[in-house]
């Protein structure tokens, strides 16, 4: 009985670790390729959410043989018009020919051209560019994939990881990703994405423009419903980390626990915990706070 319990526990632990590893792979894939997908959307009109979801699904989060060995993230086969390098793998039939690219970005570009330049996909470009569900169904109807569940799988990925928010962003020549409102989506030194509040911003407008619910924005930024937006405030678009971007910080005049948590991208409750402080307590000027590890 004990052996069975131990075996069951090990299997469960292995499953949890595997799921966590897959989650990390997927989030890393999105972070790595989202800007490319946004740029391709601007140039060719394919929703960035669809491109990312297809890349995730077709490449197994970038871990498939085609992606690793051939930089082919979309499972595009050679066809008669392909003159580039090739690799062969079993798919619907044995030993099928697939395209090989010099780098992943070339695969994303070829995916855009593959859809844009083939008449069978022409009707896709008459769809609402924000209707990712219609695009997912349309890809199956046009024959991109034989799996009946293909639309369902794409939609699931898009909604689970909120990929639809990238459909309302722009990519500028200097490399900035900009929300539809004109808010530049900046990257904190910790790697977190955030925007800076503008004059006359309110929660409803900001939420719609960055496509993140008010509840989540408040949660991500340790704020309450009655908090008013003020020009210059940092608003994170994703959950802050359990540790700060620096090891320690000496408190300056006018700083609060909340402002410090925002400055260094650390969750407010974790900042309190790391310094053995009670929620609501404020540090003294000159006091040294620990943002990584725990205070002595």
Image (cartoon, rainbow, N blue to C red):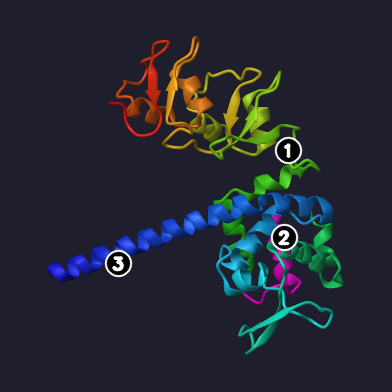
Q: Nearer the viewer, residue 295 or 277?
A: 295
Instruction: Report the magenta residues as a range.
Output: 130-149
Q: Position of residue 74 (x, y in %)?
A: 68, 68
Residue named by callout 3: 11
Which is more toward the observer, 124 or 88?
88
Residue that label 1 marks = 178
Could you say where residue 99 lies in the image, as x and y percent from the top left? Answer: 72, 76
Q: Marks 2/3: CA distance?
A: 38 Å
**Counting other residues with Cα less than 10 Å from the Cα at mark 3, is it few (<14), some (14-19), or many (20 or more)?**
few
Whichever of callouts 1 and 2 sits on the residue coming sooner in the sequence is: 2
Labelled pair 2, 3 in contact (Cβ < 8 Å): no
175 part of magenta stretch: no
Q: Residue at x 84, y 58 (%)?
A: 126
SS under mark 3: helix
3D distance between C-alphas at marks 3 and 1:
44 Å
Of mark 2 and mark 3, the one earlier in the sequence is 3
Q: Is residue 74 above or below residue 176?
A: below
Crowding at mark 1 (Cα within 10 Å: few <14, some 14-19, many 20+)? some
Q: Are marks 3 and 1 in contact (CB under 8 Å)?
A: no
- The span from disc 1 to disc 2 (Cα, nearest Å) is 20 Å
Q: Vertically, is 233 above or below 50?
A: above
Residue 207 vs 289, above or below: the answer is below
- The quarter in which the C terminus is drawn is top left
Q: Earlier in the sequence, mark 3 or mark 1?
A: 3
- Label 2 sits on residue: 105
Q: Nearer the viewer, mark 1 or mark 2?
A: 2
Q: Is residue 206 left or right of residue 276?
A: right
- Identify which residue is drawn at 49% across, 54% down: 24
Q: Position of residue 234 (x, y in %)?
A: 59, 26
**Mark identifier at residue 227:** none
């Amino acid at each position: 009985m004990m052996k069975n319990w131990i075996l069951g526990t090990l299997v469960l632990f292995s499953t949890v670790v595997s799921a966590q590893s897959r989650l990390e792979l997927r989030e890393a894939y999105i972070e790595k390729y989202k800007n490319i997908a946004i740029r391709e959307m601007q140039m060719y009109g394919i929703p960035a959410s669809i491109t990312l979801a297809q890349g995730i699904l077709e490449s197994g989060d970038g871990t498939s043989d085609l992606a690793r060995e051939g930089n082919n993230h979309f499972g595009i086969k050679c066809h008669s018009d392909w003159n580039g390098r090739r690799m062969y793998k079993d798919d619907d039939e044995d030993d099928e020919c697939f395209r090989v690219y010099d780098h992943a970005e070339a695969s994303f570009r070829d995916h855009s051209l593959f859809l844009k330049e083939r008449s069978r996909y022409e009707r896709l470009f008459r769809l609402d560019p924000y209707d990712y569900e219609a695009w997912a169904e349309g890809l199956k109807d046009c024959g991109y994939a034989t799996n009946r569940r293909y639309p369902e799988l794409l939609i699931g990925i898009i909604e689970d990881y909120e990929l639809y928010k990238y459909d309302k962003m722009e990519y500028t020549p200097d490399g900035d990703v900009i929300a539809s409102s004109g808010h530049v989506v900046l990257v904190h030194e910790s790697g977190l994405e955030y925007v800076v509040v503008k004059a006359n911003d309110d929660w409803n407008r900001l939420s719609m423009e960055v496509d993140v619910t008010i509840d989540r924005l408040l949660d991500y930024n340790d704020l309450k419903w009655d908090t008013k937006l003020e020009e210059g405030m940092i608003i994170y678009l994703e959950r802050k980390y359990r540790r700060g971007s620096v090891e320690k910080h000496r408190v300056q005049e006018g700083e609060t626990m909340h402002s410090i948590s925002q400055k260094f991208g650390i969750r407010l409750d974790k900042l309190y915990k790391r310094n053995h402080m009670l929620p609501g307590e404020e540090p003294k000027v000159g006091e040294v706070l620990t943002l990584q590890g725990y205070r002595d």
